[in-house]
Amino acid sequence: MDSCLSEPGMPPDKRLTAPQRPSFGEALRFWFKLGWISFGGTASHLAIMHDELVEKKRWISNGRFLHALSHCMLLPGPEAQQLAIYIGWKLHGKRGGVVAGTLFVLPSMFILLALSVVYVRFGSLPWIAAMFNGLKPVVIALVIVALQSVTRRAVRGPIQGAVAMAAFAAMFFFQASLLTVMLSAIALGIALTAVRPGLLHRPRKASAEEDEEGYYIQPSSATTKPCPLLWPTMKLASVVLVLWLLPLPLFYFFAADFLFWRGLALFFTKTAFVTIGGSYTVIPYVAKVAVLKLHWLSRPQMMDGFALAETTPGPLIIVVAFVGFLAGYNHFHGSLWMGTLGLLATTFYTFLPCFFFVFAGAPLVERTQDSPRIGGVLELITAVVVGAILDLSLFLGKTVIFPSGVAGLKELNVISLSGVILSLLLLYRFKLKVIPLILLGIGFGSIRYLLGF
């Protein structure tokens, strides 16, 4: 097991009531199961993990679970996957974290590979296109729900609200990159906290004290021994760099057009570094660059990829695997092998940095978590997330509601707009789960095709 951060160090009197550490095999079986049942996006992933790990297995207490989640929210990458990496690390060191994070992604990657092959081979068939058309309004409704949920949590004052709207305007009207907007928010946060330290960060009221005993990982199981940061981080960075470089010679010697593969590796590595706030922040970035700049796929294809990703388990950011598949498929003139290689390379380069962020960044985040100045800056970054999701909603929604690309009453697709409204009604009023809603969308698209309208 790893050193100070991951070693539980539970007092002897607590060992009698708390469960023993699960065996590596037991944890492996759970992470494998989680990878196949984690449908429904981040909120669903967290609910499943809390129910299984806190309520049923009692591997980690509620307080420690939320504590770890708050750290993962501050790191680039999908927070649910990173929470799995973090807990796997707490249980069995780095090998536990690697297994937990990998199995969280692998099932969705293989499912999306199969769906991508079906898409490029049969996507032009009318009945396949009808199924996707039925899914698209559902996807827009899910993004709107995510926008509402994140806004309620992130916008805690007028400054955060102003930053959210400014971020949206910069990205939607001026095509500013997400990374630029985030760096601007950080600079603003640093300036404001320097002038008035308590202006941005207002700590929430502490909740009632909870019973944290009877869990393997609990507050008293964490050691107070300070962890060295520089040397372990340098060693970890060296390992990750070697892993990052490893596929490049293979592309150079065994695959055509090395410049394409190098560009793909660099783009999706860069993507991994701008995903603060979860999947919904990186999708507009990937969509705009891949569609408008690199021309790897079309806007309707990006929308179809987003719909496909909604039907698979795992983090929604797995939509980048579909982008990588079509990039390789289209660049090499319809080669399924190159499309598959593109999907595998995209997945590798997108998720490899996530492990580095958790293993290297979590100790540093724990040391700075009580700083009001850092908390204030992070709140502005979270406000940028709101602007990014709003940008995504309009970017994708325009394709669905105005298929011609022109916004006007004559070009309005009434059926698609009605589908979005109905999906929102089912989600809010009747609390319908994501999977049944997706199936309803597919069914509606199929019925619409069979009826000929």
Image (tube, helix red, strand yellow):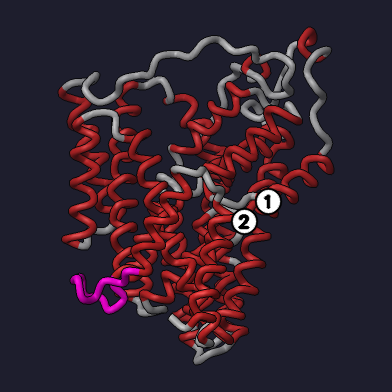
Assign the N terminus to one quadrant of the image. top right
Q: What amino acid is found at the position of numbered circle 1 in the picture?
A: Ile
* Circle 2: element type: loop
Hey, which residue is sitting farthest bottom in the picture?
333
Is residue 273 visible to the viewer in this orientation of the structure? no
Give how far apart the Cα atoms at labels 1 and 2 are: 6 Å
Query: Magenta segment range?
Result: 402-414
In this view of the protein, which residue sits in the foreground, 216 or 34? 34
Q: What amino acid is found at the position of numbered circle 2 in the picture?
A: Pro
286 versus 96 height, above or below: below
Residue 245 relative to residue 23: left or right: left
For the point 23% across and 32% down, the residue is 190
For the point 50% across and 89% down, the residue is 332
Tell me residue 29's x, y (percent): 80, 46
Hey, which residue is sitting farthest top in the picture?
13
Image quadrant assignment for residue 253: bottom right
Q: Is residue 175 magenta?
A: no
For the point 37% across and 33% down, the residue is 153
Name the residue that disc number 1 marks. Answer: 37
Is residue 175 visible to the viewer in this orientation of the structure? yes
Does the residue at mark 1 contact the one at mark 2 (Cβ under 8 Å)? Answer: yes
Residue 373 relative to residue 449: left or right: left
In this view of the protein, which residue sits in the foreground, 188 or 94? 188
**Crowding at label 1, few (<14), some or many (≥20) Cα neighbours within 10 Å?**
some
**Crowding at label 2, few (<14), some or many (≥20) Cα neighbours within 10 Å?**
many
For the point 62% across and 28% down, the residue is 5
Q: Is residue 409 magenta?
A: yes
* Circle 1: element type: helix
Marker disc for residue 313? 2
